[in-house]
Amino acid sequence: MATDPDCIFCKIIQGKIPSKKLYETEKSYAFLDIGPVAPGHSLVIPKYHAAKMHELPDDSLADLLPIAKKIAVATGADQYNILQNNGRLAHQVVDHVHFHVIPKPSQEQGLVVGWPTTKPTPEELQAVHEKLMQKL
Ligand code: 5GP
Ligand code: ZN
C-alpha cells in the first residue's frame, strides 16, 4: 500500500492525526472535514496514497463511491454535491485523493459552484471529441 510519511491524510489513516472517523474498509477511510462548508461535510479517501485521481489504482478508486453514497444517505441531505479536486487550479489543497460529500441545505451553505459555460461551434466540439476519442 503506497503511503507518504509527510502526507496529512496518510497520517489520519494511521491514527497519527486524530479525525472524526465515519467509516472504514480495507481500502478506504471516511471522516468529517475539519472545515465544513455545511454540517455533515465529509471526506472519503483511499488508504493508497496518490495525489490525483488518475494515479489511483482502479480497485482503490472503485471502493470510494459506495462509501460516499452511504455517507450522503446518513447525512439525510436531500440535496448534496460530490466533489473531487485535482491540482491547485482545481482547488486541490491536500495532495491525497479525496471525495468530498457536501450537503446543500440552503443557498448559503454547502458548495457554491461557478460554472462559466462556453458556446463552442459544432466544429470546435467535433475537434475536441476526435482528440479525446483517439485516447480512449
Ligand atoms: P481540497 O481543497 O484539497 O479538495 O480539500 C481539502 C479538505 O481537507 C478541506 O475541505 C479541508 O478542510 C480538509 N482538511 C485539511 N486538513 C484536514 C485535517 O487535518 N483534518 C480534517 N478532518 N480535514 C482536513
Ligand atoms: Zn497520503
Image (spheres, grey):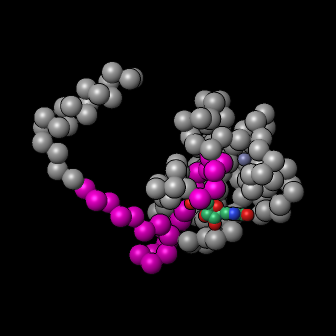
User: Looking at the image, which residue is at 69% across and 68% down?
Assistant: 34
Q: Find residue 48 and report its image quarter.
A: top right
Q: Pick whichever, 58 or 72, lies toward us.
A: 58
The residue range painted magenta reads: 93-117
Q: Residue furthest bottom?
A: 108
Q: Is residue 107 magenta?
A: yes
User: Looking at the image, which residue is at 56% across and 72% down?
Assistant: 38
Count of marks, rendered view: 0
Q: Is residue 83 visible?
A: no
Q: Find residue 18 and report its image quarter.
A: bottom right
Q: Find residue 32 and report its image quarter.
A: bottom right
The majority secondary structure of the magenta stretch comes to loop
Q: Is residue 96 visible?
A: yes
Q: What is the x, y in percent for residue 68?
A: 60, 50
Is 111 placed left or right of 20 in the picture?
left
The image shows residue 97, relative to residue 79, as above or below, that is: above
Q: What is the x, y in percent for residue 131?
A: 29, 28
Instruction: Tell me the quarter of the image containing the C terminus.
Output: top left
User: Looking at the image, which residue is at 66% across and 35% down?
Assistant: 60
